[in-house]
Image: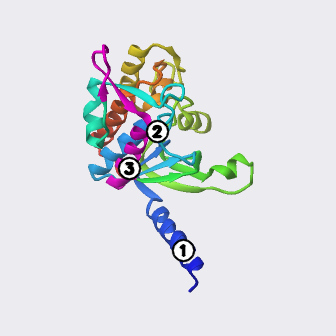
Amino acid sequence: MASENIISKAIVQTYSEKLTDSLNVDVALVGAGPSALVASRYLTEAGFKTAIFESRLAPGGGVWGGGMCFNELIVQDDALDILNHFGISHRPVKDGEGYHTIDSVEMASGLIFGAVHAGVRIFNSVKVEDVVFHDNRVAGLVINWSPVLKLGLFVDPLTILAGAVVDATGHPSTVTNLVISKAQIKLSTPTGGILGEHPMWVDHGEVSCVESTAEYYPGLYACGMAANNIMGGYRMGPIFGGMLKSGKKVADLIIAAGKRK
C-alpha cells in the first residue's frame, strides 16, 4: 500500500473509531472553553464517559487572547487548586493581594492537554444545531460540521446521545436557547427563560458565574458564561477563577446526581 493511502486510512479509521465510541456518552459538553475543559477532566477522572463538541477549529474558548490580546490573564487564590491539578503555573500579582497572573497560552494549552490526557474526547469544528429530546428531558445533541452550517449546505446531521448535556457555549448560551425555542420549555429561572448577561462588575461576576452553574432543565446543565447569561449575572472580563470553579462545580453536580446514559 502506498504511503499516502496508509496515512489517509489511519486517519479515517482512527477518527471513525473515536466518533463511533462517542455516539453514546455519559456527558456531552458543548463548547471547549475553560469551564468545559475543567468539568470534562473531573468527570472523566470520576469514571464518566465524556466528550466535548467545539464549533471552532481551536479549543480553549476566550482564554487564548488574555486581556485585549495581552496574553496574560488573572486568577484569584481560591481557584489555584484547579490550576495546580492541571499543572499550570501562576505568579502572584504585585500589590494585588489574592490575584495571580497566568500566561494565557499556557493556560489554554494546559487545560486542553489536561482534559485530553485524562481521556476526554474533543471534537473540534463540530457545531450543535439541535438537541435530542426524550420524555421531557434533554437526551443528547444534533451535530454537524461547522463549515456545512456556515455555508448553508443542506446536509443532514448526526446525533449524540447523552445522560447529561452541558451548555458551555459562553455568552450566547446557544444550547439553552435551542432547548427553549425548539422544545417550548421553561427553565428553572425566575422567569422560566434566559435573563440575559449584565454589564461588567468583576467581583459580582465571579461569584454569580459559580452560583449560576446548575441544572436548568432535566438533563440540561450550564456552566461558565452560559450560566451567567441564563441567570443574569455580571460580566467579569479577563479574570478566570469563576470560570474554573464553575467547571468544577458542574462536574460535582453531575457526579453527585450520577447522571450516566
In terms of secondary structure, where does tag 1 sit? Answer: helix
Please tell me which residue is depicted at 52% across the width and 16% down the height of the picture.
Answer: 198
Side of 212 where 195 appears, left or right: right
- Identify the residue at image location x=32%, y=33%: 249
Q: Residues within 10 Å of mark 1 (few under 14, many from 20)?
A: few
For mark 2, does the 10 Å Cα neighbourhood hold few (<14), some (14 to 19), or many (20 or more) residues?
Answer: many
* Range of residues picked out in magenta: 91-120
Disc on the earlier residue, 3 or 2:
2
Q: From the viewer's perspective, is residue 109 above or below residue 200? A: below
Image point 53% across, 20% down: which residue? 197
Tag 1 residue: 7
Q: Are marks 3 and 1 in contact (CB under 8 Å)?
A: no
The residue carrying mark 2 is 33
Dividing the picture into quadrants, the one containing residue 109 is: top left
**Residue 204 % position (x, y):** 40, 14
Query: SS at mark 2?
Result: loop
Q: Give the amino acid at mark 1.
A: Ile
Marks 3 and 1, the one that precedes in the sequence: 1
Name of the residue lying farthest toward the bottom: 1
Label 3 or label 2, whichever lies nearer to me, is 3
Task: Label 3, secondary structure: give it.
Answer: helix
Rendered residue at 32%/39% (across/down):
88
- Residue 94 screen position, x and y as percent: 31, 17
Q: Classify 230 as above or below 44.
A: above
From mark 1 to mark 2, how far is it between C-alphas?
31 Å
Residue 252 pos. (x, y %): 29, 38
Mark positioned earlier in the residue sequence (1 or 2): 1
The amino acid sitting under disc 2 is Gly
Quadrant holding the N terminus: bottom right
Examine the rendering and report whether any part of residue 222 can be seen. Answer: no
Which residue bears the numbered disc 3? 113
